[in-house]
Each structure stands twice: as C-alpha cells, then as structure tokens.
C-alpha cells in the first residue's frame, strides 16, 4: 500500500477500467497487500476504489506465502 507505482499506476488503472472488466465477465477485482485492514481501508478511500476494487489485507502474509509471492530483501 502507498508505494509510488502502486498508488500512481496499478490501483488507479484497475479503478478506471473496473466497468470494462465487469462487462467482460469479471465478478470482482481484488487488491491484496501485506498490510492491515486499516491501512488497506485508508488506501482504498484515497484511491476511490469503493465499489470497484476490493482492498484485501493480508496482515500476516499468509496468502502471499501460500502463493509464493514473498520476496526476501534482507541482502
């Protein structure tokens, strides 16, 4: 949440084109991020995503781990 590229390009693109996705048969657009529900709620409000993109919190990174989407940046 709130990274420059995701806030400027990724989420706004899905919000802007949500109707086209739904017209093509997409039921819901989800944005999943390793943040808590409060951060995702605030980010969704800032992005005006209500009714277009469901902002999903993965606070413990369980979903990210289960799908292999984690990245170790320790080095």
Image: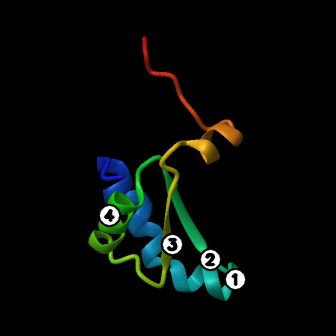
Q: Is tag 4's residue or tag 1's residue first in the polypeptide sequence? A: 1
Between the C-alphas of marks 4 and 1, the distance is 26 Å
- The kind of secondary structure element at disc 1 is loop
Mark 3 and mark 2 lie on one chain; the one further toward the N terminus is 2
**Secondary element at image label 4:** helix
The residue identified by callout 1 is 24
Q: Residue 28's mark?
A: 2
Snapshot quadrant of residue 73: top left
List the residue tagged with mark 4: 43
Q: Considering depth in this image, is 10 or 43 the residue closer to the camera?
A: 43
Q: Earlier in the sequence, mark 3 or mark 4?
A: 4
- Alpha carbon separation for disc pair 3 and 2: 7 Å
Question: Residue visible at 41% across and 61% down?
Answer: 37
**Residue drawn at 35 percent across, 49 percent down:** 5
User: How far, Cα to Cα, is label 3 from label 4?
Assistant: 11 Å
Contact (Cβ within 8 Å) of mark 2 with mark 1: no
Question: Disc 2 vs disc 1: which is toward the camera?
Answer: 2
Tell me the distance, in whole angstroms, between the alpha carbons under discs 3 and 1. Answer: 18 Å
């Amino acid at each position: 949440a709130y990274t420059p590229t995701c806030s400027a390009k990724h989420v706004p693109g899905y919000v802007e084109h949500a109707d086209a996705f739904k017209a093509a048969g997409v039921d819901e657009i989800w944005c999943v991020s390793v943040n808590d529900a409060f951060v995702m709620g605030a980010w969704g409000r800032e992005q005006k995503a209500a009714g277009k993109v469901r902002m999903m919190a993965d606070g413990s990174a369980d979903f990210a781990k289960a799908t292999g989407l984690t990245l170790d940046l320790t080095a």
